[in-house]
Amino acid sequence: MVYERFGKRFFDVCISLLLILLLLPLYPVIAFIILLFSGTPLIFTQTRTGQLNQPFQIIKFRTMKNSNQNTYKTKYSWKNGVPDDFIFKSPKNAEISKMGRLLRKTSIDELPQLINVLRGEMSLIGPR
């Protein structure tokens, strides 16, 4: 059991460090693209629950619009309440930027999570 955990952790550190080094030239390019199309901040952090219910900050590239960029706000003027045929959910999430849609589709927005893996807060699982 101890050897399995040590082996998995060793694997996680080696692979995440290798991937971070290999993808290092890509990070500034992605950051520049996000800055160009969406502005700052470039990184999104969120508190998630990890092993043994310990909270940690997950790191991702930001794919959603800033609250001050939100142009999706709509005012409804219904006199008799919400119509029966009204659908609240739009087909596309208007909060996601155009570039963010591409980053999510290609999973590039998750590249900073390699830092979480290196810190030991996450582990590499699956082919993604």
Image (cartoon, rainbow, N blue to C red):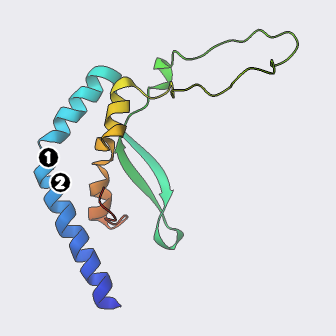
**Residue nearest the viewer, comparing 121 with 72:** 72
Q: Residues within 10 Å of mark 2 (few under 14, many from 20)?
A: some
| Residue under the point 17% across and 33% down | 29
Front one among 83 and 37: 83
Q: What amino acid type should be assigned to the residue bearing mark 2? A: Ile
Residue 101 marker: none
How far across and how far down the image is residue 7, in percent?
Answer: 25, 81
Q: Quadrant of residue 81?
A: top right
User: For the view shown, which residue lies furthest in the front direction?
Assistant: 85
- Measured Cα–Cα span from mark 2 to mark 1: 6 Å
- Within the image, what quadrant is residue 98 found in? top left
The percent position of residue 103, horizontal first and vertical second, equals 32, 36
Q: Nearer the viewer, residue 94 or 105?
A: 105
Q: Quadrant of the C terminus?
A: bottom left
On the image, the x and y values in percent for residue 71 come to 51, 15
Could you say which disc has been placed on residue 20 in the image? Answer: 2
Residue 40 percent location from the top left of the image: 34, 28
Amino acid at dot 1: Leu
Compared to residue 47, the image places residue 117 above or below, namely below
Q: Residue at x 27, y 83 (%)?
A: 6
Are the residues at dot 2 and dot 1 in contact (C-beta closer than 8 Å)? yes
What is the number of the mark on residue 24? 1
Can you see residue 73? yes
Looking at the rendered structure, the secondary structure element under dot 2 is helix
Is residue 105 positioned above or below 115 on the image?
above
Please report the residue visible at 58 percent of the width from the left and 25 percent of the height from the top: 90
